[in-house]
Amino acid sequence: MRIARFATPAGQVRFGKVEGEAGAPVEALTVAAIAEHPFGTIELTGERWALPDVRLLAPLLPSKIVGIGKNYAEHVAEMGGETPDAPLLFLKPPTAVIGPGDAIRLPVDSDEVHFEGELTVVVGALGAREVPRERALETLLGYTIGNDVTARDQQRNDGQWTRSKGHDSFCPLGPWIETVLNPSDLALRTELDGQVKQDSRTSLLLHDVATLVSYVSHVMTLLPGDMILTGTPSGVGPMTAGQTVSVTVEGIGTLSNPVRAR
């Protein structure tokens, strides 16, 4: 099931089930309103809209977004440094979240803002605390797409990552949540103005999804709707105002965002 959060033509914010064949053009899809929220039993209200008639929003507003650094070997190599033995954690603030089609705003104090396309894990209704690895996937609502936008020059200068990854608009998420998906070997591709920049598979994650969920849950309680950015493959690079960055994950769809000056 594909679960979206959207604004109706009348401006109401709703959750909905996206209906239509996987991979079909947007024009062929509809969204059916969910009675309350996506956690627990899904009940539809009977209201439906053509997908082009609504505005897709970030699928959820998480209490926290946990990022995983250096989780693809080739990305570690392109960035330099050593591969961490355990998952390398950082946080992005909820205020960094934007949805599909929303603009990534370039900060005035950075000259090197990079895209980082990533498979993103969405925690389910029960949350997750000290979950064993073998039960980790049971705690999930599903998966979406994230772009861990990073001011690379600030990351180098600061020696830690809060400012470089925490700017408003630096966490595009969407276009929806896919609830039934095997995350072990999915194609991941990032394009900048239609040119492929990142092309990899989640089978190359150094720490897989179950390991990440379990590890993070032993550090902090993951609440319903919290998200884990699982790491980015090699090929990261700069974006400039006027460009468009699109991240595609097999089995989910494509998240596209324009880049604008702040």
Image (tube, grey):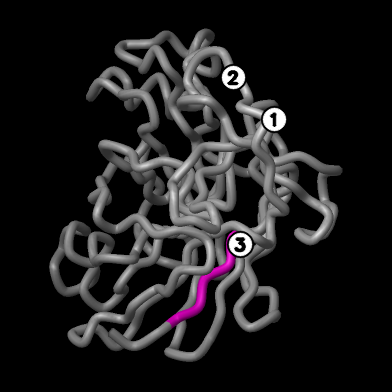
- Sequence-first tag of 2 and 3: 2
Q: Nearer the viewer, mark 1 or mark 2?
A: 2
Q: Nearer the viewer, mark 2 or mark 3?
A: 2
* Residue 257 part of the magenta segment: yes
Q: Position of residue 170 (x, y in %)?
A: 34, 64
| Circles 1, 2 touching at the beta carbon (< 8 Å) | yes
Q: Residue at x 25, y 46 (%)?
A: 91
Q: Which residues are magenta?
A: 255-259
Question: Which residue type does callout 1 highlight?
Answer: Met
Residue 190 position in % (x across, y down): 62, 66
> Label 3's element?
strand
Task: State the residue position of label 1.
Answer: 1
- State left or right for residue 158 relative to residue 248: left
Q: Is residue 84 part of the magenta span, yes or no? A: no
The residue at the far left in this view is 158
Label 1, secondary structure: give it. Answer: loop
Kindly report the secondary structure that dominates the magenta region of the rendered protein: strand
Query: On the image, numbered disc 2 is attached to which residue?
Result: 42
> Where residue 202 appears, x then y in whole percent?
64, 43
Can you see residue 232?
no
Name the residue nearer the viewer: 241 or 110.
241
Which residue type does callout 2 highlight?
Answer: Ile
Q: What is the crowding at mark 3: few (fewer than 14 residues within 10 Å), some, or many (at least 20)?
A: many
Q: Nearer the viewer, residue 173 or 160?
A: 173
Whole-number angstrom distance, CA of label 1 to CA of label 2: 10 Å
Instruction: Assess whether mark 3 and mark 2 are in contact (beta carbons under 8 angstroms).
Output: no
Residue that numbered label 3 is attached to: 247
